[in-house]
């Protein structure tokens, strides 16, 4: 338990937390003032561009850059030789464990190219046209190799091998023959055979999902500026400036202190901006040219060369008694990692059955490399894929025993004290409350018409804490500059300011929140894992309490009384000893700070622990056009346990955003490759994300089961909302058509084929 | 002595042991003692990033969280997220 929690904090009357003020960054965003990744311009700035592989798999026999280098206007050309070659070694980079051997090869190919779009060389020139011309002059001699795109094909013993030195981890003894299977993971407990023997009904099915991209509108972009003495500045769109610094300094052989990274405003990340692509290349080019270099990915580059999430093949088996108790659950997950190991199969396996209380459960997962771009995190990495399959089977089991699917889930729902499939017991969680809210919701009772179906699914995500700092600088007028190190993606400047104002007892408008660069604070883990309102919130609260302690001391000095006789309440120091009542406001104390001891700064540097899982239940109604196979989302309700919604509008926004991304994943989005391993739809015209006309207003219900480890009960909400949608929609489409859908996306041709196959049968 | 529960891959590397009693007052000591007890686990504990659940509460990348004498401890993969 965290020792900063006051037992009464949740009981006290909150004035700001839980309200819906305007966001501090709102005006800049709606007026176009906000500076995103591609908005930075510097004098003498060069344009950097990347030469990318036309092959899915090929050995690089040679690269000749001399003609490109000789072109007028070209100031620098780089290849992998300009980055450090690092050994295969998992090392801490900030809080993450990364294999720098893979990272240096992913940002710039060395011995081989492993996917279409893999970076091979980069140039910096005085104009984009010259840079493009220079790329055409780089001569690369390839030996094209056989490639493999499909996960099950890649697992076969005779599959084209991506890495000669990959021997499956997690299999005892470790295989002596290399393969594309990087890792086997297994979780679970109990006796599966006995569990299935007790079942009256057993459902077993196979599922497939396709890789889908995070689909952020803002492409990867950065500006690097390295001076002649080696000091470097980098501006980039990222979810974690400190992680970018850690990665880039390692790849370029720089001391961390020589590189200052500033995060721009971010136009969406969803996990995809937790890694580096252009940043080390821009730094290497700038280091060579001694001029600033700007690089921006095109949309096709974003699709071809930045990480989607895995596609997968999944098998699930669930047994249950007629009275609605699950007796056993078994799952096999095969996830594509892309060109380098590290798919989210491990968290996927841990999430798969997490919403349920099971006595007998097993999940086995395989992390498999294929000739596709290396996957990156995508909201609740791995969870949506596994839970799509499990929640579909759960729905089918409920159907077979003739039980309402919400009631069936309630009978088996995980709660406080339930042992998770990955081992530990849950603390307080709110799945039951989300299911009860679903049952009680008017949406669940509305009658459906012909060709319409209703689906329900639940979802789980862990949420995390991590290293976090905050600094609170008190101005001479009593206003506060709040500096945090986690980029604001989902409205965190608002939620963090609100917690600061609540603690200090001042109005929100007196607090100016900002995102610090890497030189302004100690290390901060990135914005991800639904951790910012939780972790940065804890740091902000601790920094505020540091300020309050100093203010109490200053007031005690002024009044010449013991500090124990000074309390902080409603933005004022108050004398609580015997005698005349006295008080000093924060502004009054700030005005005399110089005379009473100097400027007042509150700091916090923590490794936040005690994150609380968030669970959700989604309801969706669909209508299927039997003539075209088109699925229309008629109504959607997302219900989620937020712990405490600091700013309910932004919690609702996260829930709505996750639901809409899930609708895209369920109905349209997929990477389509031709026989040569070329991506055929690297653009938003052919890779169809939902637009406003595709979705109804997403209704939301926030459930609040406080996380006892956070000063305000916060859990974190950003990831869980993308877990239930695919299963909820698949269940709805299945009920509308009478055909069980097990393959994503449920695009019109697939749905129509299934309907016609049923009619023909 | 704290009770450490092992499952899946970690159980394989610990000669199939599903439950181990370990004398450890904090997470750092627990990992050290576990590596001594099962040398096959040691490289994985160093290479992979693990979280430790003590009586249901998950701690990630921290060494000095106390472990009670009757605590139930699970070693699980670290969670990152997107």
Image (cartoon, coloured by chain):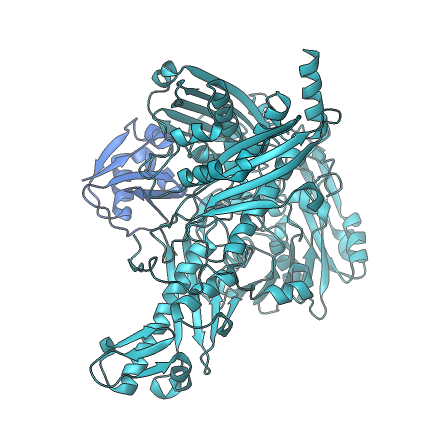
Q: Is residue A636 left or right of residue A441?
A: right
Q: Is residue A676 left or right of residue B4?
A: right
Q: Is residue A617 left or right of residue A552?
A: right
Residue A450: image location, x then y, percent: 66, 25
Picture quarter containing residue A592? bottom left
Q: Is residue A507 visible?
A: yes
Residue found 56% across the figure and 51% down from its top: A653
Picture quarter containing residue A282? bottom right
Residue A723: image location, x then y, percent: 52, 38
Quick one: A146 or A360, which is closer to the camera? A360
Say which chain is cyan: A
- For this orientation, the residue located farthest to the bottom is A595
Quick one: A139 or A320, which is closer to the camera? A320
Q: Is residue A232 left or right of residue A692?
A: left
Vertically, is B55 above or below A711?
Answer: above
Vertically, is A81 above or below A44?
Answer: above
Give the total number of marks visible in the rendering.
Answer: 0
Vertically, is A586 above or below A538?
Answer: below
Residue A241: image location, x then y, percent: 53, 59
- For this orientation, the residue located farthest to the top is A761
Say which chain is blue: B
Residue found 61% across the figure and 47% down from its top: A107
Q: Is residue A743 visible?
A: no
Vertically, is A322 above or below A267?
Answer: above
Residue found 53% across the figure and 42% down from its top: A638
Quick one: A503 or A290, which is closer to the camera? A503
Residue A760: image location, x then y, percent: 70, 12
């Amino acid at each position: 338990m965290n020792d900063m929690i006051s037992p009464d904090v949740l009981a006290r009357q909150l004035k700001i937390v839980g309200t819906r003020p305007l966001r501090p960054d709102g005006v800049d965003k709606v007026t176009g003032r906000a500076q995103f990744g591609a908005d930075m311009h510097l004098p003498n700035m060069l344009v950097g561009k990347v030469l990318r592989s036309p092959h899915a798999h090929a050995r690089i026999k040679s690269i000749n850059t001399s003609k490109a280098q000789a072109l007028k206007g070209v100031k620098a050309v780089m290849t992998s030789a300009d980055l450090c070659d690092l050994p295969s070694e998992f090392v801490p980079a900030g809080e993450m464990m990364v294999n720098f051997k893979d990272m240096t090869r992913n940002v710039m190919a060395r011995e081989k190219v492993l996917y279409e779009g893999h970076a091979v060389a980069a140039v910096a020139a005085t104009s984009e046209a010259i840079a493009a011309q220079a790329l055409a002059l780089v001569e690369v001699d390839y030996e094209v190799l056989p490639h493999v795109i499909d996960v099950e094909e890649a697992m076969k013993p005779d599959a084209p091998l991506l890495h000669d030195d990959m021997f499956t981890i997690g299999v005892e003894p470790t295989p002596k023959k290399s393969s594309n299977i990087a890792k086997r993971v297994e979780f679970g407990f109990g006796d599966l055979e006995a569990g299935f023997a007790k079942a009256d009904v057993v459902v077993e099915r196979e599922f497939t999902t396709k890789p889908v991209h995070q689909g952020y509108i803002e492409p990867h972009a950065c500006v690097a500026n390295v001076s002649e003495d080696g000091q470097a500045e980098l501006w980039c769109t990222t979810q974690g400036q400190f992680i970018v610094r850690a990665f880039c300094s390692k790849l370029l052989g720089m001391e961390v202190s020589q590189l200052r990274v500033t995060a721009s405003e971010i136009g969406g990340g969803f996990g995809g901006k937790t890694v580096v692509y252009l940043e080390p290349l821009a730094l290497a080019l700038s280091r060579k040219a001694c001029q600033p270099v700007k690089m921006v990915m095109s949309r096709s580059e974003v699709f071809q060369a930045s990480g989607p999430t895995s596609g997968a093949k999944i098998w699930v088996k669930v047994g249950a008694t007629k009275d609605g108790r699950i007796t056993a659950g078994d799952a096999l997950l095969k996830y594509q990692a892309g060109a380098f190991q590290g798919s989210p199969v491990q968290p996927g396996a841990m999430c798969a059955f997490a919403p349920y209380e099971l006595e007998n459960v097993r999940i086995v997962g395989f992390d498999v490399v294929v000739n596709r771009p290396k996957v990156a995190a995508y909201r609740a990495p791995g969870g949506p894929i596994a839970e799509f399959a499990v929640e579909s089977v759960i729905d089918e089991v409920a159907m077979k025993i003739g039980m309402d699917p919400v009631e069936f889930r309630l009978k088996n729902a995980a709660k406080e004290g339930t042992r998770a499939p990955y081992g530990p017991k849950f603390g307080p969680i709110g799945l039951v409350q989300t299911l009860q809210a679903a049952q009680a919701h008017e949406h669940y009772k509305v009658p459906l018409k012909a060709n319409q179906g209703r689906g329900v699914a639940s979802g789980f995500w862990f949420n995390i804490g991590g290293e976090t700092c905050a600094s609170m600088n008190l101005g001479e007028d009593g206003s506060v500059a709040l500096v945090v190190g986690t980029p604001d993606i989902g409205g965190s400047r608002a939620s963090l300011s609100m917690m600061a104002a609540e603690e200090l007892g001042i109005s929100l408008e007196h607090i100016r929140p900002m995102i610090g660069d890497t030189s302004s604070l100690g290390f901060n883990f990135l914005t991800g894992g639904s951790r910012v309102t939780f972790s940065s919130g804890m740091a902000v609260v601790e920094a505020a309490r540091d300020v309050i302690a100093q203010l109490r001391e200053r007031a005690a000095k002024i009044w010449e009384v013991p500090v124990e006789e000074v309390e902080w309440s409603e933005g004022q120091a108050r004398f609580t000893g015997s005698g005349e009542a006295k008080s000093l406001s924060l502004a009054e104390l700030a005005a005399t700070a110089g005379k009473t001891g100097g400027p007042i700064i509150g700091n916090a540097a923590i490794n936040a622990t005690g994150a609380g899982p968030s669970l959700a239940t989604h309801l969706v109604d669909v209508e299927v056009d039997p003539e075209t196979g088109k699925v229309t989302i008629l109504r959607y309700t997302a219900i989620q346990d937020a712990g405490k919604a600091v700013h309910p509008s932004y919690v609702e926004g996260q829930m709505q955003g996750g639901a809409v991304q899930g609708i895209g994943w369920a109905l349209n989005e997929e990477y389509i490759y031709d026989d040569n391993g070329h991506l055929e739809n690297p653009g938003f015209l052919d890779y169809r994300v939902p637009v406003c006309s595709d979705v109804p207003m997403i209704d939301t219900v926030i459930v609040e089961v406080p996380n006892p480890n956070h000063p305000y009960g916060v859990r974190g909400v950003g990831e869980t909302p993308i877990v239930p949608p695919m299963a909820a929609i698949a269940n709805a489409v299945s009920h509308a058509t009478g055909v069980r859908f097990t393959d994503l996306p449920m695009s019109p041709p697939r749905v129509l084929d299934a309907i016609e196959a049923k009619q023909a049968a | 002595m704290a009770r450490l529960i092992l499952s899946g891959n970690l159980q394989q590397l610990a000669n199939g042991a599903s439950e181990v009693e370990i004398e450890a007052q904090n997470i750092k000591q627990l990992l050290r003692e576990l590596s001594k007890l099962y040398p096959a686990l040691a490289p994985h504990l160093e290479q992979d990033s693990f979280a430790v659940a003590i009586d249901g509460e998950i701690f990630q990348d921290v060494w000095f969280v106390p472990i009670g004498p009757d605590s139930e401890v699970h070693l699980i993969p670290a969670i990152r997220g997107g």
